Amino acid sequence: MLTLECPYCAVMADETELSPGYEAHLKRYGPGSSDEEFEAYMFARKNPKGVHFERWRHAYGCGKWFLAARDTATLEVFGTYTAQSAAPPQALQDKIKAKRPDWKGYK
Amino acid sequence: MKRYSAFALAREALSNHMGWERAWAAPQPKAAYDAIIIGAGGHGLATAYYLGKNFGITNVAILEKGWLGGGNTGRNTTIIRSNYLQDSSAAIYEKARSLYETLSQDLNYNAMFSPRGVMMLAQTHHEVRGYQRTAHANALQGVVTEFISPQRVKELCPILNIDGPRYPVLGALWQARGGTGRHDAVAWGYARACSAMGMDIIQNCEVKGITSANGVVTGVETTKGYIGTKKIGIVVAGHSGQVADMAGFRLPVEAVALQALVSEPIKPCMDVVVMANTVHGYMSQSDKGEMVIGGGTDGFNNFTQRGSFHHIEETLRALIETFPIISRLKMLRQWGGIVDMTGDRSPIISKTPVGNCFINCGWGTGGFKAIPGSGWAMAELMAKGEPGPLAAEFDMWRFKEGRFIDESVAAGVAH
Amino acid sequence: MADPVAPWGNAQFDGFAKVAEIGPLGMITLRAKRDVAGLEQAFAALGLTLPDPRRIVIAGDKAAGWMSPDEYLLVMPYAAVNDALASLAASLAGQHHLAANVSDARAVFRIEGDKADQVIRKIAPVDVDTMAEGELRRSRAAQVAAAFWKDGQGYTLVCFRSVAGYMMGLLSHSAQPGSELV
Amino acid sequence: MSTRLSKGGRLIDRARAVDFTFNGKRLRGFAGDTLAASLLANDQMLMGRSFKYHRARGAVASGAEEPNALVNLGRGAFLEPNQRATTTETFDGLEAQSQNHWPSLEMDIGVVNNALARFLPGGFYYKTFIHPRAAWKHVFEPVIRKAAGLGPAPKEMDGDRYEQAYAFCDVLIAGGGIAGLQAALAAASGGARVMVLEQTPVWGGRAPVDGDVIDGMAADLWVKKTVQALEAMPNVTLRTRCMVAGVYDHGYVLAEDRVADHTPGDGRPKKRLWRIRAGRIVAATGALERPLSFAGNDVPGVMLASAVRDYVVNWAVSPGDRTVVVTNNDDAYRTAIALKQAGLAVPCIVDARAVANGPLPTQARAMGIRVETGKGIAKVKGTKRVTAVTLCMQAGEGAALEEIACDAVAMSGGWSPVVHLWSHCGGKLTWDDTHAMFRPDATRPPISHDGLAMVYPAGAANGALKAAQALADAALAGAAAAGAGPIAAAQAEAREEAALEPVWIMPQGASYKLRAKMWLDYQNDVKVSDVQLAAREGYESVEHTKRYTTLGMATDQGKLSNINGLAVLAGALNTDIPNVGTTTFRPPYTPVTLGALAGEARGEIFQPLRRSPMHAWHEQAKAYFEPVGLWRRPYCFPRGGENHAQAVEREILNTRQGVGLLDASTLGKLIVKGPDAGRFLDMMYTNVMSNLGIGKCRYGLMCNENGFLSDDGVVVRLAEDTWLCHTTTGGADRIHAHMEDWLQCEWWDWQVYVANVTEEYAQIAVAGPKARALLEKLGGMDVSADALPFMTFADGTLGGLPVRAYRISFSGELSYELAVPAGYGQELWDKLMAAGADLGVMPYGTEAMHIMRAEKGFIMIGDETDGTVIPQDLNLGWAISKKKADYLGKRGQERSYLASPDRWTLAGFETLDGSVIPDGAYIIAAGVNANGQGNTQGRVTSTYYSPTLKKGIAMGLIKGGMARAGEVVEFTKLGGSPVKARIVDPVFYDKQGAKQNG
């Protein structure tokens, strides 16, 4: 039963107030892309046992999507940030690197 | 291998059961094998068994990180059915179901296949049409099912509340030869049979790397040292992505927690398996008397074998509405398993980008019922290097082509 | 044209707290970013103040609540909505915004009494004790979305119209005499 | 015999007798009793039968760990099976029945299994019942099922009600013994919000029974003062009868509050489930005593030493007149002393250790109790009640030295910390050799969302078994959990105790015959010999052993058997206990009522029922409803003696010939506004929406990124920068979320706002050739063909109500959809019904709507689509823009399988004999596939009897589609021969659209 802080309204939201949205920072491939690119965009997932960047929506709250960095093996949440982010904030990346020296980055 | 029977039991009783052999050996790994199966769950063991039985390949090691049968094989709700809609699904699940029919005799180990019947309740008109469609498909597929009336539903399962008021039962898809099995016994029975064929089941042996030369596998690095092999089958539900990563490819798979629970045991009150998809819950009663209840999956990647509790509450709300008498029973134990979910929620039994490396994964919430069929198809793939008809459609490239095997077939609700 | 019908007929229940459906109230959902030019003036023109995040500012029979970084809920008498919409349109002309009448899309309940908070505690995963003065909380009330705030000796709770009956049942069950949280 | 002592009993109120029945027998207890105490006070030692061998069983414990004394409580709508007598409070009118026996508790036929026990070792069923094949299902399994199962299934709907509540705290303390109370003081001292939950009705745990002295006062008094102090603190909440069932991730705690379990019928909820979000959790859950494994250790009268002490001290109940104490530690001497002080006989203390001369043994000897060291119990005599024990050398093989007559045995094999809550979220354990127990490994705690320790064990749960250490440990744990500074812990008088000596089998060299009578898991009848058999057969992992033998899988979940079983397994494998490891601890700690887990969600509020503004009218009109998502929509409105089909036929004919009303309020309505709204909608829909004229309507299709059709509806342009998108009923929330997803996560620089106004409007379809006449009767706006042509809309008034009228048609008739603020929906409906009376207006339901649209060849999301169908399959290419560079789903549709010419595409079908093609039928193709399955070439998607055309009509998907028009194909028919049908145009009615356009 996760709690994640919504970066928009600063509510520590209960998992039941959220809806999940799986992997974050996917690049959309549309018409003109190759079959491989489109497949990778739609289906290939990092699915790491460890640091994972993912999407959540504060569905029962402000309705906004946000992103979270969470360890899928321990469920530790390193931080959350708005969905309008092309990459995780540097401070968050630094924090994760400090806690998980083996982490290979979000890409 | 000493055979199991009532006579053997009586004979051993006279010698205080001191004469029983080990069910399976505990060998150290050899330097090399003809084939290595990674993962000694039901699917991995069944693959090994049919490699030996159907293809005479017995120089096989089955490597297991923990204890055999300790993954999803040992933590599911043991439902066996094959009333699937799509042809390729129906084919492999029906193969599995028919192998379950004789599994105890085949393995000389009582896997307790109990064809008590599985019913899937239709509680909306939309569901009625959907299950009727499945019944038509099944008729062509050679899967014996029928669409039954609410009255027949009530006869088969008197504790069911068919009158709603919220979701009255409008009928059900009934597979009389579906049922349940004893999950642990399936793994143990296969393990015993594999061991008897001379295969090495190596527990507490974690694969740390996969080696290859010229794009073809050569062996595995393990916590018990390097082991050479000509072929590898990866059968590690829940951790497929991690092992695939060792081999150097990525899968269309995400790992999520699936939950289940059992009640305290009560005297028999339910002789069939009931699945109620409108309200999201399913239930059967184990031979011990526990009500075995399946919950939903979480919507986030998770490797903890613990799910989020609200799914249990949702399931129980649904089941108390469906089976009002269970309200005063108590939840004895709840748990989770990590399941692989693919892009179309159907499994993958496939060659991979790496030569002689094969994968079997993505069974999602439906793996136990498939074990014998999955092993049969995977063994054929590994032995021949090409899929047979059972596995043909389950390749990992179907997503690129948009060739989904989609069992959910309910895009939206009607106008 | 008769008066509009409240979704659940202004039902009431007297338990350890008093539950009543009130309204219909006038409500406008306003989508606009905070930095939109003229937003404060638009509120002012309605006799309202722009609320801080997660707050509701109540001014007599009107109120303005923060719903998200680009959404506000304006509450007022039912009959005042059309004028308010016109006022907003004038104030925000040329600015990217969306204002819609949602008066009929909502059901509004009051939960009153010194134990009113216990009803909220039973249905929403919200730490009522740490709710600030004037805080508007959007959350879940058992199985449906709801927003609520403390107002005098009780709470005002807003949900969707179609689930007004469910909400009344839920609130009544939660306020049953004998089921006080002790 | 067991009986009530004339004095004492710290928990009972002798002034308040309570009457209850057991197996119909009227008995009397006292307020404060547990049912087990009451039964023992009435010399009812025999309380139940075991699961497998149906052996006679009495209570072995006094609390939550009890495996034997399970009863059915109540009857009818209040029947509750498998209630532990040791935790059930005795109340006036309580009705209990023993279970798992036939015909009676005293005389149980099932006990024949006991005689056959040698043929039924652990896992026997895996080795037999294999032949003949059919016999398992039809012979063996039914017999096994009947014999198993403990209590009976309830037959009625639950008569009680339940509820749930949320709570939040900084520190949650599980356990109200002295450690929990001390931890609470420490945690609360710095102002943290603290909640203390105790599973029993009383505070203090074991310390008062053990006679501890804390801060110079009797433990009872210290507990009372401490509870008062905590009650006075505004930041502390205390609850008894509230069991912490489970610890979940991120500090989520589930607790079962037995609100009215002991006061049934007083109007309160039976139970309340607390869903608590705690910053940190202190597990002050104590420890449980372990049985000793000697032959006959399950005979009624053999109890845990601590339980015997509890019965004597707490409830003034003597389990027996003559109690032999058997132990491997000093603590059990307290039981002997307590018995002696209560005036009862203790013929002997049998101590497996070679030496026992600490203060407690010395005190016992001084009281005149005989102590035999280095000895064990070879065997307990008696079946339904202990009659004697025979002693042996612990180091020997069980040769009898002496028989001692007794009617009770108090045993102690040492203590195991209750580590469940520590372990639920992955806290690891370490083996403590000194005390022979697993305790929490502080270096590997379960962690919370912030990566820091989530659970702090305290007191006995942390292995600090004695009061002095427990208090000190708890003070530290409480402060640490709250992040507060340390406080001085209460001081308990320390009494020296010698170390225990692990004894896993008694005697050490016991023969097979003895080992086959040593119970590890009482309820599931797992014995030492069974675990040893499992080990011999290679079930070496502790999980294998557990599953093979069912050790620890009973309703007590191994609270008594786990460690003893592990130790026996380790012995059999010739390894150390820590190498064997433990099984996983899973919630709940003790079983939780399913009704409490479902909470209030029953009956009317089982799920939210979404109602349209006209729902009440439909109910009064006796509509037959169908669930559509959480809505219920009228399927039809039967009149008189009509069945549903007749009602639907009438509704269709009336609409086609006159005028009908459909409540279409549930359709989704989304306002999309902004400078980029047109561009956005062009991405959302397959067709172009940006060029739609203001005041015009256009039918649109939406796909998901995979290319599959997911929703459809009419899009309306309200203003230059504003559109209104109609969705399907099920699509309203889904499509709204879908739009927000793309706007927030992909195109966040686009200026578009979306508002879901679905419920703002009641929407009524007025359809039929007389629809215009009806609206004109209401009067107000101009609804003529010129003023309001097909696929346009206008705002205005009708009957004095503000409406927006859309000229759109899903029936193929002249049709208006009228949107009105929901609060006026009923008024508009009433006015339409009244004004239309002489036009013959009738409401119609969803089924009539379905059939009429099928007659017209309109597709239906959910019928023609199933998540695998693309618009091209449905001949909807006209609604797919070829000009647009991109829209959601476009790239997905370009993939080879979706672009294949072999896809099944839409066609109409008419049977040769006019019959209706069965729902769900497939179109048969020749031959079989590689798996031997019959080949198919298509399937039906909508099939109805058309009242308008008086014959069966259908739509379906078929390979080749309309290019094969005229061909005859065969549809499957269950239990019959295939149905022949001709491929025809799917538009069966008004092909030119003269009616809807008129």
Image (spheres, coloured by chain):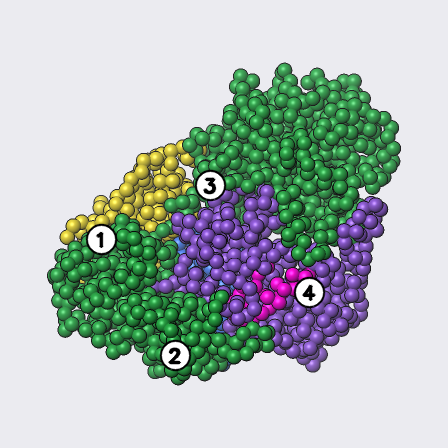
Chain colours: A blue, B purple, C yellow, D green
Distance CA(mark 4)–CA(mark 3)? 44 Å
Q: Which residue is mark 2?
A: D983
Q: Is residue C17 visible?
A: yes
CB within 8 Å, label 4 to label 2 = no
Q: Which residues are magenta?
A: B80-103
Q: Residue drawn 79% across and 65% down?
A: B198
Q: Earlier in the sequence, mark 1 or mark 2?
A: 1
Give the numbered dot on residue B46. Answer: 4
Q: Residue drawn 33% across and 50% down?
A: C163
Distance CA(mark 1)–CA(mark 2)? 44 Å
Circle 1 packing at 10 Å, graded few (<14), some (14-19), many (20+), is many
Q: Main secondary structure of the magenta part?
A: helix
- Tell if the residue under mark 4 belongs to the same chain as the one under mark 1: no
Q: Residue drawn 64% across and 18% down?
A: D5
Q: Which residue is mark 3?
A: D157
Image: B247 above or below D461: below
Q: Which residue is mark 1?
A: D826
Work out whether residue D711 or residue D212 is closer to the camera in this orientation and state it: D711
Image: D306 above or below D276: above
Q: Position of residue C94 (x, y in %)?
A: 23, 67
Question: What kind of residue is marked 1?
Answer: Gln
Q: Earlier in the sequence, mark 3 or mark 1?
A: 3
